[in-house]
Image: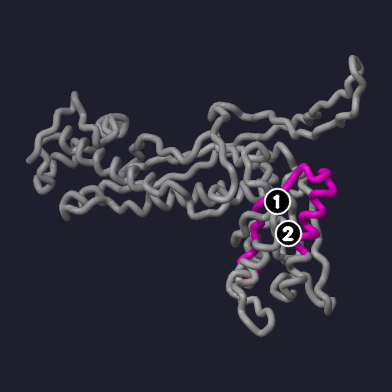
Amino acid sequence: MEKYNPVMPSETYSRADYEALMNSQMPAGIAETPSMHFDSAEDAGIFFARELDYIKTKTYDKLYPEFNALKLFPTSSEVDPGAVTTTYYSYDQMGMAEIINNYATDLPRVDVKGTPSTAQIKSLGDSFGYSIQEMRESRFAGKSLDTRRGAAAKNAIDRKNNMIAWAGDEKSGLIGVLSPSNNVPIFALPTNTAGTSTKFVDKTPMEILNDINNMQSFTAKLTKSVEKPDTLALPTDAYLHLANTPLIIGGNATGTILKWILDNSPRLKNIVEAPELNADSGISPYPGQGVGFMFSKDSDKFTIETPMPFYQHPVQAKGLEFVVPCEARAAGAIIYYPLSMLIILGV
């Protein structure tokens, strides 16, 4: 059997995990089992530390979560994980330039007005683990421990982070991009020509384009064209309708409605699908109706603040199992310019 030096541990395992295992005395008990073929408790401890390191590494292999918020929105981890709140400012530009005379001393003053807001920072946590018997079986069968438990732990925290980014958490005081209290303007879609529905799937391409142009005009009027949102996120049914429906002009197909709208709506750079906006998503604070979200994809406008992304603590021995506690820190959406985005109801 390969020999390991516990004083100079291999780089392929965590020293903290190894020490936690050795302090539990469980490796010593396992090493006493002849069928395990461990020369010492140290060998057993290193073997299991390497197993845990493999699991943790596999958990981190996926660099981007499946959930849309952390892919669609600008993210930041600049706040220290030890902070319990973070204060930021929502800004509004004030003042105008004027024509002046030579030697003028009374130049018009412009300024930026900032309104302070304080965001709460909360911890998210879960854990995964393995029993002593599972570790014995792993060694006996020559197979690695199941990595899916670590992946499930990361998935659960990513899922919660995603929900907070979209809709916040009212009980914890966290704000999301759709939270009713975040000062983001709301735009209610008009019905189609027949007067029966506001949904994109029930509208003609020209009606949809008019809706999108009216959204942009609404933002332009509020901000005197300072803000020009460039991304539109839509519920699944609305997005698929645009992406899969051919546009027929003069009896000929000229591409999809999605391409036609992007070609004829110059301020929009992208239209994307976000299942979190579906009427039945269970995430949106506007249940029963599809919601659109138009925004400027710019970290100067807003960010999703995660002071501490997913982190796996050293293993802990509890009874006859080893548990790996997992943690993250979340502050939700930090919105510097609320008028750079728009919530659209009835999509």
Q: Nearer the viewer, residue 181 or 49?
A: 181
Q: Which is nearer the eye, 3 or 92?
A: 92
Question: Where is residue 274 shown, x and y percent of the image?
Answer: 60, 59
In the drawing, what numbered circle is on residue 131? none
Q: Nearer the viewer, residue 29 or 138?
A: 138
**From the viewer's perspective, is 317 left or right of 46?**
right
The number of discs equals 2
- Residue type indicated by callout 2: Tyr
**Left or right: where does residue 320 sit relative to residue 33?**
right
Q: How is the image coloured?
A: one colour
Q: Which residue is mark 2?
A: 286
Q: Would you place residue 326 above or below residue 278 in this image?
A: above
In the image, the segment drawn in magenta is: 211-238
**Callout 2–callout 1 Cβ contact below 8 Å:** yes
- For mark 1, what is the residue? 178
| Residue displayed at 13% across by 44% down | 33
Q: Give the quadrant of the C terminus.
A: bottom right
